[in-house]
């Protein structure tokens, strides 16, 4: 059964229990109210009977006309109360019928007792004896009426007590039923939700610790069961992915070894012919210069320059490969101090040049110091090179706000370049200016981009012909970096 279906059943059961309890409490309260109404009506009947007895006694004792009229009113009021009594049960209804009959009989006796005497020859002794008998019968009738009224009052009190007890039983039974329903709901929630969730939590901890063989193995068809099966499928996929990654790492290790072997071959096997070309060309120029014409000497010079340029290209390519393979050692780096060191080195190489350096203080980033030095060396050497023909060269290093975060920049007022070719800017061997104007291998900016990409940093440029160029780079915000965990899923 689905958890949502179970939840709806629990909700419906709980609401039904509450409605049932409310109905039972309402019924019990209605019983108490009805019993209390009967008690009030029984009290009115008792008071009416007492009033009738008082009027009857006064009339018997003093025989005033007023008492006879009051007895008629009291008897009528009592008869009205007995006719409208709220007693539907058998016992009180019987008592009411008996009361009504006795009251009617008492009223007839009272009427006979207080009727005017007959004129004429009447036996006074017999008349008095007859009146005494009527009085006795009337008093006995009133006594029986009082007994019936007391029975009716006792019945109402007993009914009130019984109704109150039923109300208490209903409340206690309702609370017990509600507690049972709550316990059943808690048991269902614990068995179908909480216990499986604890198992899933255990599974996530195991996977986080690197145990990708852990399985939940839920057989239920509810939402948590499907989630558990998806979890098992995810761990299976992760296990396969990490196995593939491990195989790829082995292949990458083998490829790196091949690259190292290739680099060694390039560094040694290719350099030897180049050194030979350069050396023999120099020997020819030194030993046989007088035997060569100008064209021959120019050809040898070109051969030497080409071999030397080839050597520089090999060095740059090897440097690009080393940048890719070097392990990052990220730490806090004072970028301002590093730029000043490189600027001083460039100035010492060409002391005849007068360049204005504008370097902001306090620029710090988290990066690999050695790789960041290589990137800044390339950027500053480019700025130094491309301001060589500027009358008042200025090289700036600082920070600006970009998308709410600081971005570093290296800018100059040199020759600049056309932004329509910016997509070629960071490619290997891509040049914006001819080598005859500004010498170089075309590898420097490719190294710069590779270094910043390894730091997960963005790098871009803005420029215009004759207005200089500015290169921006922005490192990832380390304050939002999630802590890396020591397990394969971290």
Image (cartoon, rainbow, N blue to C red):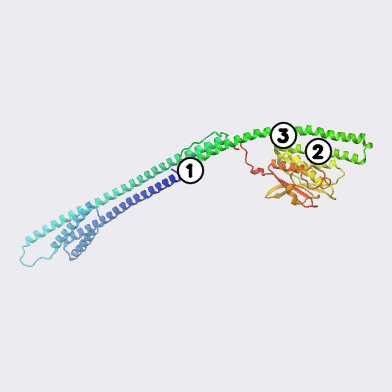
Disc 3 residue crowd, few under 14, some 14–19, many 20+, Cα 10 Å: some
Q: For the point 6% across and 64% down, which residue is it?
A: 122
Which label was assigned to residue 223?
A: 1
Which label was assigned to residue 310?
A: 2
Which sits earlier in the primary sequence, circle 3 or circle 1? 1
Q: For the view shown, which residue lies furthest in the right direction?
A: 290
Where residue 77 appears, as percent x and y from the top left, is 23, 61
**Is residue 487 visible to the viewer in this orientation of the structure?**
no
Q: Is residue 280 above or below residue 356?
A: above
> Is 142 in front, or is 248?
248
> Is 89 in front, or is 218?
218
Q: Secondary structure at mark 3?
A: helix
Question: Viewer-nearest of labels 2 and 1?
Answer: 2
Where residue 326 appears, as percent x and y from the top left, is 71, 36
Which sits earlier in the primary sequence, circle 2 or circle 1? 1
Which label was assigned to residue 259?
A: 3
> Given contact means CB atoms under 8 Å apart, are the residues at marks 3 and 2 in contact?
no
> Given contact means CB atoms under 8 Å apart, are the residues at marks 2 and 1 in contact?
no
């Amino acid at each position: 059964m689905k958890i949502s279906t179970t939840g709806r059943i629990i909700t419906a059961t709980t609401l039904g229990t509450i409605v049932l309890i409310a109905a039972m409490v309402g019924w019990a309260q209605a019983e108490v109210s009805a019993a209390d109404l009967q008690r009030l009506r029984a009290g009115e009947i008792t008071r009416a009977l007492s009033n009738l007895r008082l009027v009857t006694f006064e009339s018997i004792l003093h025989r005033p006309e007023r008492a006879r009229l009051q007895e008629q009113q009291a008897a009528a009021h009592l008869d009205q109360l007995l006719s409208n009594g709220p007693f539907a049960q058998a016992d009180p209804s019987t008592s009411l019928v008996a009361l009504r009959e006795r009251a009617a009989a008492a009223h007839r006796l009272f009427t006979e007792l207080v009727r005017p005497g007959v004129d004429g020859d009447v036996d006074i002794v017999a008349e008095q004896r007859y009146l005494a008998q009527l009085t006795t019968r009337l008093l006995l009738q009133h006594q029986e009426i009082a007994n019936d009224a007391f029975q009716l009052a006792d019945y109402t009190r007993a009914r009130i007590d019984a109704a109150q007890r039923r109300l208490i039983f209903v409340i206690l039974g309702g609370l017990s039923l509600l507690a049972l329903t709550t316990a059943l709901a808690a048991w269902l929630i614990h068995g179908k939700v909480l216990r499986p969730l604890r198992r899933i939590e255990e599974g996530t901890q195991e996977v986080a610790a690197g145990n990708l063989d852990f399985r939940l193995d839920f057989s239920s068809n509810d939402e948590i069961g499907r989630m558990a099966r998806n979890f098992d499928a995810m761990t299976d996929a992760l296990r396969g992915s990490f196995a593939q990654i491990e195989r790829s790492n082995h292949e990458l290790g083998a490829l790196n070894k091949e690259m190292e072997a290739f680099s060694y071959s390039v560094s040694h096997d290719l350099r030897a012919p180049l050194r030979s070309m350069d050396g023999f060309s120099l020997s020819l120029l030194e030993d046989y210069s007088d035997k060569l014409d100008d064209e021959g000497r120019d050809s040898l010079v070109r051969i030497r320059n080409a071999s030397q340029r080839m050597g520089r290209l090999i060095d740059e390519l090897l440097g690009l490969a080393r940048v890719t393979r070097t392990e990052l050692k990220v730490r806090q780096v004072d970028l301002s101090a590093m730029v000043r060191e490189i600027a001083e080195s460039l100035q010492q190489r060409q002391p005849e040049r007068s360049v204005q350096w504008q370097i902001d203080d306090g620029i710090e980033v988290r990066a690999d110091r050695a790789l960041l030095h290589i990137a800044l060396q390339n950027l500053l050497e480019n700025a130094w090179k491309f301001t060589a023909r500027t009358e008042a060269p200025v090289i700036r290093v600082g920070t600006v706000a970009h998308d709410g975060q600081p971005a570093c920049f290296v800018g100059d007022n040199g020759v600049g370049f056309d932004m329509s070719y910016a997509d070629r800017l960071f490619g290997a061997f891509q040049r914006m200016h001819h080598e005859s104007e500004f010498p170089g291998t075309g590898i420097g900016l490719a190294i710069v981009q590779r270094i910043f990409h390894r730091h997960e940093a963005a790098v871009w440029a803005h420029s215009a012909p004759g207005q200089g160029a500015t290169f921006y780079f922005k490192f990832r915000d380390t304050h939002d970096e999630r802590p890396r965990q020591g397990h394969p899923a971290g």
